[in-house]
Amino acid sequence: MKKIVMLWAIILFICTGLLSGCTEQSNSENDKTSEIAKVKLIDTDYERHSTIVGWYDYYKGTIKNVAGYMLNGVSVTVKFYDENDHFLFKRTDTIYYLANTYTKEFSVTVHSYDDYAENIDYVKYEFLAL
């Protein structure tokens, strides 16, 4: 009888442990995969370089951590749009370990052979905490 009770207790313990992890939302401080990063865009720059086979553009900038704590990672996404406000494509750079109040530079590159590269009219920036 004791073995049956012990077996049921183990099964109940395992089921409770498995089912308790089945939540959609998390309020954990460490779970920031889709949270907008608390950074300030300090400046941006654009440079075009010509080569024998075409050109490439650098989209660069600097961000500052204004979160009040260390950011373990920031995903910097540069989204490219045409003159009709149609999204063309995006490029992403990742910055790791950005201390509070510190700044770091990011950059992405677009090549002339990239699809829709010649249609770029403007860009938007998105910052997500990792």
Image (tube, rainbow, N blue to C red):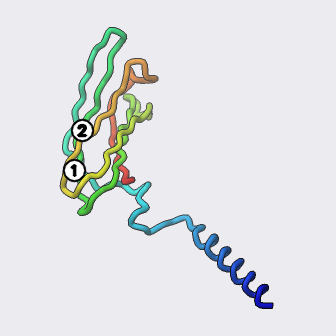
Q: Secondary structure at mark 1?
A: strand
- Which residue is labeled 2 in the image? 61
Q: Is residue 32 left or right of residue 105?
A: right
Query: The residue under label 1 is which amino acid type?
Result: Lys
Quarter occupied by residue 105: top left
Q: CA distance from mark 1 to mark 2?
A: 10 Å
Query: The residue under label 2 is which amino acid type?
Result: Gly
Compared with 96, 116 (above or below) is above
- Which residue is labeled 1 in the image? 64
Quarter occupied by residue 29: bottom left
Q: Position of residue 59 (x, y in %)?
A: 28, 32
Compared with 57, 12 (above or below) is below
In the displayed orientation, state which residue is furthest to the right: 1
Q: Residues within 10 Å of mark 1 (few under 14, many from 20)?
A: some
Q: Is residue 103 left or right of residue 20?
A: left
In the displayed orientation, state which residue is furthest to the bottom: 1
User: Residue at point 59% right, 73% down?
Assistant: 20
